[in-house]
Image (spheres, helix red, strand yellow):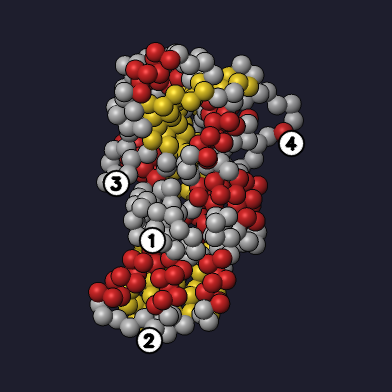
Amino acid sequence: MHQALGLAESVMYLTAPNPRVGCVIVQHGCVVGAGATQRAGGPHAEVMALRQASERNADVVGSTVYVTLEPCSHYGRTPPCVDALIAAKPSRVVIAMSDPNPLVAGAGVRRLCEAGIQVTTGVLAEEALVLNPGFVSRMTRQRPWVWVKLAATLDGRIALLNGKSQWITGAAARADGHHWRARSCVVLTGLGTILSDDPQLNVRHVETERRPAKAVVDTRFDIPENARIFDGTRTFIFTTATRADKAARLAQKNVQVVQVSEHAGRVDLAAVMQWLGQHDINEVHVEAGATLSGALLEASLVDELLLYMAPMLVGEGLGLVRLPVLHNLSQARRFEFIESRPVAPDVRLRAREASHWGALLDAVGIERK
């Protein structure tokens, strides 16, 4: 199963909106076929593994199949994987995680059992979930898994008081951030960042066939039409007040203007996440200023923090996020650290909202530790 998980991880940037899945077929103690899910519309992991076994003229009858996600049992862009497995006649299928897709919902396991195939589930299940939090979130919470990327000094500053922030972190940390952009389905920012930095928000330093879309939260639809973010990549503008002529011109640059409801005089961020979930967006990578990052946190829409911390002190400066003043520490928003990794000369910290992760564990039947 560890090998199957490694295969799933190898397609981290490729499969969205489908989940990342790996499959390994073992016969008489030897691996005879292995594969991972390909780009959406392409073959799934089980088919890739069976195909490799066939190319090797390997007999898979009576084999054991290890797969990181319950085989699909419905027709989508491809036929059901469970049909291919049943036809191959393995004696046993070992599954890491159940599929939360309502179109599957245990049907894959049930059909394998009905075909006389022994099924074992829950092997390294949480490790499988780690590879697909966005898919599970979209299927069970109807919204993507959201992380906010931040870069700060040891004293928690993201910029000097004059707004200068290039560069707080080193080249290695900035390059590492592109891997997180690449694995996401959407890179999201706010109008303030567009006006102050005019970023492209594209993916560099990573070789991948699939490029994430981009999104801008822009309450009054004030974004300049010549902003560098408009490079032909699919882009969404979330606004409360659109103008047909401007929207039509931006549409020629592959930009979709999405009018959403208003909340407290701004774009309703919960409505944004709901819309993204309805449009097959699994994971959202946020690179924004303190205002939008804080608003997402205040709305309980942030599942994970991705913080690059530089070993420097700058004194007075701009803070990480803008949140309401608290009067008691019991009101603090608490996360749990899940990773600390050096990205010389900086360090990368990841912190997760425990209750949000717990909801995903519950959704796929994994016992909380």
- The alpha-carbon separation of the residues under discs 3 and 2 comes to 36 Å
Q: In the rendered view, tell whether residue 96 sits above or below residue 305.
A: below
Return the residue at label 2: 28
Which amino acid, by three-letter code, is at mark 4? Ser
Cα–Cα gap, marks 4 and 3:
44 Å
In front: 314, or 318?
318
| Residue 84 % position (x, y) | 40, 71
Residue matched to label 3: 208
Q: Is residue 204 above or below residue 106?
A: above
Question: Tag 1: residue type?
Answer: His
Q: Are marks 3 and 2 in contact (CB under 8 Å)?
A: no
Q: CA distance from mark 2 to mark 1?
A: 24 Å
- Quarter that holds the C terminus: bottom right
Quarter location, residue 49: bottom left
Which residue: 36% across, 23% down?
Answer: 251
Disc 3 residue type (three-letter)? Thr
Q: Nearer the viewer, mark 2 or mark 4?
A: 2
Please say if the residues under marks 4 and 1 sit with CB atoms less than 8 Å apart: no
What separation in Å lies between label 2 and label 4 (alpha carbons)?
57 Å
Between discs 4 and 1, the one toward the N terminus: 1
* Label 1 element class: loop
Label 2 close to label 4 by CB (< 8 Å): no
- Secondary structure at badge 3 equals loop
Q: Residue at x 28, y 46 (%)?
A: 209
Q: CA distance from mark 4 to mark 1?
A: 46 Å
- Residue 67 in the image: x percent, y percent? 45, 68
The disc placed on residue 44 is 1
Task: Decide: few, some or many residues near mark 2? Use Cα within 10 Å; few <14, some 14-19, many ≥20.
Answer: few
Q: Secondary structure at mark 2?
A: loop
Front-lying residue, 105 or 348: 105
Viewer-nearest of labels 4 and 1? 1
The kind of residue on which mark 2 rests is His
